[in-house]
Image (tube, rainbow, N blue to C red):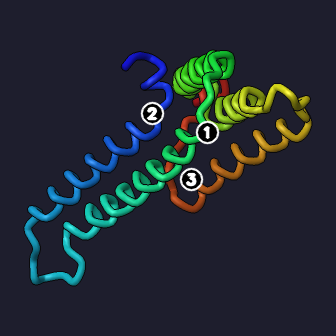
């Protein structure tokens, strides 16, 4: 039971652990005091969340069982995945750190641009124009939604007078 075992069964293990957590969460939601004053009490959302989590854990287990049957050892792909995970983590940290300086729109557009490039398959040449349009449009749309429809203030950035 070494590295190959966990590599082969990591999805299944994650699904089982998540299912156990979901079951414990659902059991915990049974202990929330119910009241007669409202039709939907405080226990409603935890029961919904627990049920969704249990369903997703079941999907994970099902998918993992299918993957175990067609498992092959591919360490090169795993190294690329590890690099992408580390780059994603770095981009998230840089995004959060740059938010006050650059503001929400510019830091979000840059984050989306670099994440899109990172997630583009190696066999595909990135379409820079489409990535820029996507990044800017999504950032502006999100800013508009939060600012004008939800009335939430987002950082505009020190560089832009914020």
User: In what quadrant of the picture does the C terminus appear?
Assistant: top right
Q: Position of residue 104 (x, y in %)?
A: 61, 36
Q: What kind of element bears circle 2?
A: helix
Per the model, the C-alpha gap separating discs 1 and 2 is: 12 Å
Q: Position of residue 131 (x, y in %)?
A: 83, 37
Per the model, the C-alpha gap separating discs 3 and 1 is: 45 Å
Asked if 27 appears above or below 61 in the picture, the reply is below
Per the model, the C-alpha gap separating discs 3 and 2 is: 41 Å
Horizontally, residue 162 falls left or right of residue 23, namely right
Q: What kind of element bears circle 3?
A: helix
User: Which residue is nearer to you in this view: 46 or 146?
Assistant: 46
Q: What kind of element bears circle 1?
A: loop
Q: Which of the labelled discs sits on residue 4, or is there none? A: none
Q: Nearer the viewer, mark 1 or mark 2?
A: 1
Q: Position of residue 35 (x, y in %)?
A: 9, 77
| Residue sitting at x 50%, y 44% | 64
User: Which residue is nearer to you in this view: 147 or 63?
Assistant: 63
| Residue sitting at x 67%, y 19% | 80
Residue that label 2 marks: 9
Horizontally, residue 12 falls left or right of residue 147, namely left
- Image quarter for residue 101? top right
Q: Nearer the viewer, mark 3 or mark 2?
A: 2
| Among numbered discs 3 and 2, the one appearing first in the sequence | 2
Residue that label 3 marks: 146
């Amino acid at each position: 039971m070494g590295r190959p075992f966990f590599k082969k069964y990591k999805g299944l293990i994650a699904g089982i652990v998540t299912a156990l957590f979901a079951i414990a969460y659902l059991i915990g939601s049974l202990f929330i005091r119910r009241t007669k004053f409202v039709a939907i009490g405080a226990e409603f959302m935890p029961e919904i969340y627990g049920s969704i989590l249990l369903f997703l854990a079941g999907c994970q287990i099902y998918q993992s069982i299918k993957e175990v049957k067609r498992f092959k050892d591919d360490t090169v792909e795993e190294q690329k995945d590890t690099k992408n995970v580390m780059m994603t983590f770095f981009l998230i940290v840089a995004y959060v750190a740059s938010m006050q300086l650059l503001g929400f729109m510019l830091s979000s557009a840059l984050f989306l641009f670099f994440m899109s490039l990172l997630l583009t398959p190696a066999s595909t040449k990135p379409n820079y124009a489409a990535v820029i349009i996507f990044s800017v449009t999504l950032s502006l749309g999100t800013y508009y939604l939060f600012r004008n429809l939800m009335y939430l203030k987002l950082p505009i950035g020190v560089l832009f007078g914020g």
